[in-house]
């Protein structure tokens, strides 16, 4: 039976990187999932109440650009989104590249198989910012989402921190995400479960 869920992202978060790598690995393994990837802004999540939203002054928030680029690829070239999505996370967290630098971002996009210049032109057209505003606002207002990665099913929304990466093991991606979904569906009474020490 197909399992449908959404999961949000912001390329700045290492835990989002871990979770999304597991999701992408599971999809590569042929997991029977219908996944919707949602954009989220950690910068907006940290705006104080009454402050100016990031989408009203995006020039002050260059960190938005990578998320907007991912959104453009998701909506205009969905078949290339998995590779671009993974490449943007890797550039930020494995290579420590500054994705606020448009030249760096364009190079990463080119390397992932899309035309970086064209993607950034779409970002500049303005519509991706409107989509980000809509998706972020909906998840906050309707689901009380506060960060990434948040997994969303028809019955629940849960913020999840996975400490490991699939490291090329696609089957591990399936197992890991299935466990997350099973807990969401089968044990909704569990609200928080956090180790006091980081397990290695």
Image (cartoon, helix red, strand yellow):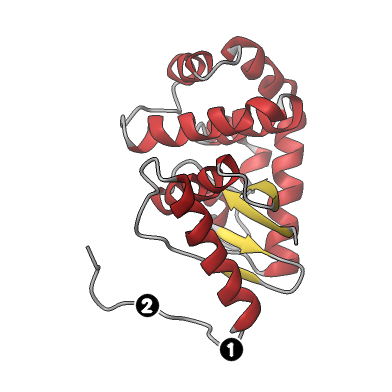
**x then y, percent, for residue 110:** 52, 13
In the rendered image, the vertical position of residue 110 relative to residue 139, given as above or below: above
> What residue is at 35 percent from the left and 27 percent from the top?
97
Q: Is residue 148 visible?
A: no
For disc 1, the marked residue is 189
In the rendered image, the vertical position of residue 41 relative to residue 177, given as above or below: above
**x then y, percent, for residue 95:** 31, 29
- Which label belongs to residue 194? 2
Q: Quadrant of residue 81?
A: top right
The kind of secondary structure element at disc 1 is loop
Front one among 127 and 27 = 27
Q: Is residue 67 visible?
A: yes
> In the picture provided, is 129 more to the left or to the right than 42?
right
The quadrant of the picture occupied by the C terminus is bottom left
Q: Residue furthest bottom?
A: 189
Front one among 50 and 144 = 144
**x then y, percent, for residue 103:** 46, 14
Tell me if mark 1 has few (under 14), some (14-19) or many (20+) residues whose alpha carbon lies within 10 angstroms of its own: few
> What residue is at 67 percent from the left and 48 percent from the top?
38
């Amino acid at each position: 039976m197909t399992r449908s869920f959404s999961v949000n992202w912001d390329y700045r978060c290492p835990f989002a990187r871990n979770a999304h790598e597991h999701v992408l690995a599971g999809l590569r393994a042929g997991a029977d999932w219908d996944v919707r990837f949602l954009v989220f802004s950690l910068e907006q999540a940290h705006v104080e109440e009454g402050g100016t939203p990031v989408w009203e002054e995006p020039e002050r928030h260059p960190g938005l650009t990578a998320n907007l680029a991912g959104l453009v690829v998701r909506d205009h070239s969905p078949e290339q989104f998995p590779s671009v999505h993974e490449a943007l996370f890797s550039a930020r967290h494995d290579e420590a590249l500054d994705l606020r630098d448009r030249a760096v971002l364009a190079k990463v996009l080119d390397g992932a198989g899309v035309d970086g210049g064209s993607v950034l032109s779409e970002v500049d057209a303005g519509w991706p910012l409107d989509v980000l505003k809509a998706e972020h606002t909906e998840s906050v207002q309707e689901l009380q989402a506060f960060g990434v990665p948040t997994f969303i099913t028809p019955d629940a929304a849960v913020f999840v921190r996975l400490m490991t990466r699939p490291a090329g093991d696609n089957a591990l991606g399936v197992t890991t995400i299935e466990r997350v979904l099973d807990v969401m569906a089968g044990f909704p009474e569990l609200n928080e479960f956090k180790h006091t020490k980081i397990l290695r």
